[in-house]
Image: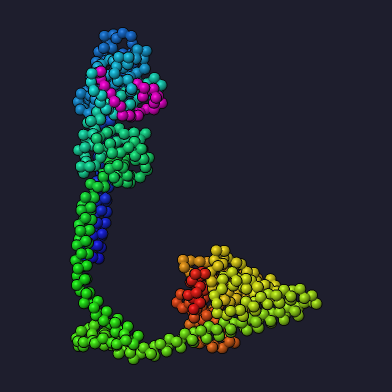
Amino acid sequence: MFIPILVLGVLSNLIIENYIKDAIIANNESLLRQAKDNVELIFNELDAISLYFITNPTINQNMNRVLRAPVLESGDITLFDTVRDFIDAPANARPYIDSIYMYIPNDYDRYYNSNNGIDYLRTSHDVSWHRSIMMHGHEMMWAESRTVRAYSFEPSKKVITLYRKLTQAQNSGVLILNISTDYIEKQLEHLKVLPEQQIFIMDQNNQLMTSQAQLADYTSHEFVDIGLNKQSVFTIQSAAGPSLVSKLKSDKYGWSFVTVTSQKSLYKVPNFLKKLTSFLLIACFIAGTLLTYFLTRNNYRNVKSILNIIHSAKYGTELSTVEEKPYHVYNYIIQNVLRTFVEHNYLTVQLSERKYRHEVLELKALQAQINPHFLFNTLQTIYWKVISLTGKPNEANVMLEHLSDILKYALDVPMQLIRLEEELQYTRSYIEILKYRYSDKFKVIWDLEENLLDYRVNKLILQPLVENALYHGIKNKKEQGLIKIKIRAKGQQLRIAVIDNGIGITPGRLKQIRDRLQYSPVNADDDQPHIGLYNTYKRIKIQFGAASQFMIKSKAGFGTKIEITLPLIDQETVGHFSK
């Protein structure tokens, strides 16, 4: 009951969330494109006015004379009225146009205002546009958000002002179009799909050009982050919670059209589905708990009866009376347990003791088998080395010292687990002896972690692997060979690998070796090759069982890798594995 509801609830929630997110992203893209087209269409009014002046140089010159002349003549007034009618026509016909200014640098601080006609900077309450012209002297067109007030007794209002120079000359005239922010916000409000969805415009400096009451949840820093983000769709965190943001850039003005949708309102249906799923899961848990209690109470009693019978049979106490119920499953189990346990308990104990003794004897025999084998090879090496000397026993003495250390190590306490550092010292002594015989035939590379030296391993575990790499891999190779001894810890395992670049092993021979490792008896013929590998394999299996691994990989002509995996055994746990 619990799992299907959980899976269904989670999958349904994920599917609905993804569907809603994809749908709102597509809708936001369409919404922003429509908002961008509508706003750019509004500001195209300024292009029409500026085109009028650009295509009529005579009117442009006369307007220059009107704004710069100390006294207006009658002909100038007539021309001014014509130009004024053209400028005022869109201002009066378009509800979103607050006012239109025209400014040409002059000695009288005179400019044209569609609301007042000829106006002066020194008496006007709106002069911030003039500072903007001074700051953007080299730009042909720009926009900004401003607060204006026509008269001192009127409240301030926000406008978006678009500036457009008539020519590229330094003292060129500038057309200023003031668009009512309230009108644009109303247009954006009509485009909203969700009640808590917000649409606003940011300029090229990541400053807010429109404002709504709901935007108080976002700080100026968050607006900057929105403006600097290069992605078209992303998520932000605010005081109102996580929100989905969609952005569309206006190449013409450099503005960003942004919509912010609260995920709380966006995912109302998935959130309801989560609550419903949680309620059903709790209900299923309660119902399942009660059902389990009543169904398992009788089963518990029957299992307890079985355990009591086993306990009585094991310790020889009086068995309780068992009522026979031919068609009762637990009664059938109890009768079979009684018969099987009583009949085989004694034989099982005997077999366990015999198996344990056999494993102990086998471990001793295997470890003792390595020592004579290695001693024979070492003495043979010393023999050939002494023949090659000319009365100077220095090298032979060193070899004998190494041999003495090896024999003492191999014969001392054969069953105990020893520190990895001791095993490495023994292996290095063995390698030094081999180097006297084979000179520059091989080179050994050590790759181990120093923090592993205190962990415990089987005695004489590395020497057979090195011997195998030299005698079966590198000895028959013409070039100098490499033997790499790599020791690493991974999780709770110690991995010991001996890798050589010798002649390798053919696939058929490799299969024979692996089969012999798995199926050969302990008392196999000692004259067979790779006897050291077999003994090492048997010893770690007897010592650690399934907690150990022995792996051989090889490719003819490339080399061989033998890797042993043992449990990580420290001073605290060595007693358990030495039993």
Task: Indicate the quadrant where residue 247 lies.
Answer: top left
For the residue pair 332 and 176, the one nearer the viewer reads as 332
Residue 393 is at least partly visible in this image? yes
- Residue 140 coordinates in the image, percent (x, y): 37, 27
* 421 versus 215 height, above or below: below
Task: Indicate the quadrant where residue 226 lies.
Answer: top left
Task: Indicate the quadrant where residue 308 lies.
Answer: bottom left
Left or right of 462: which side holds 579? Answer: left
Q: Residue at x 25, y 26 (%)?
A: 157
In magenta stretch: residue 139: yes
* 403 versus 144 height, above or below: below
In magenta stretch: residue 429: no
- Residue 490 coordinates in the image, percent (x, y): 48, 66
Chosen colour scheme: rainbow
For the residue pair 345 and 502, the one nearer the viewer reads as 345
Q: Residue at x 34, y 18 (%)?
A: 104
- Residue 441 coordinates in the image, percent (x, y): 67, 72
Residue 530 is at least partly visible in this image? no
Span of residues in magenta: 130-152
Looking at the image, the residue that sits furthest to the front is 317
Q: How many marks?
A: 0
Q: Residue at x 69, y 81 (%)?
A: 379
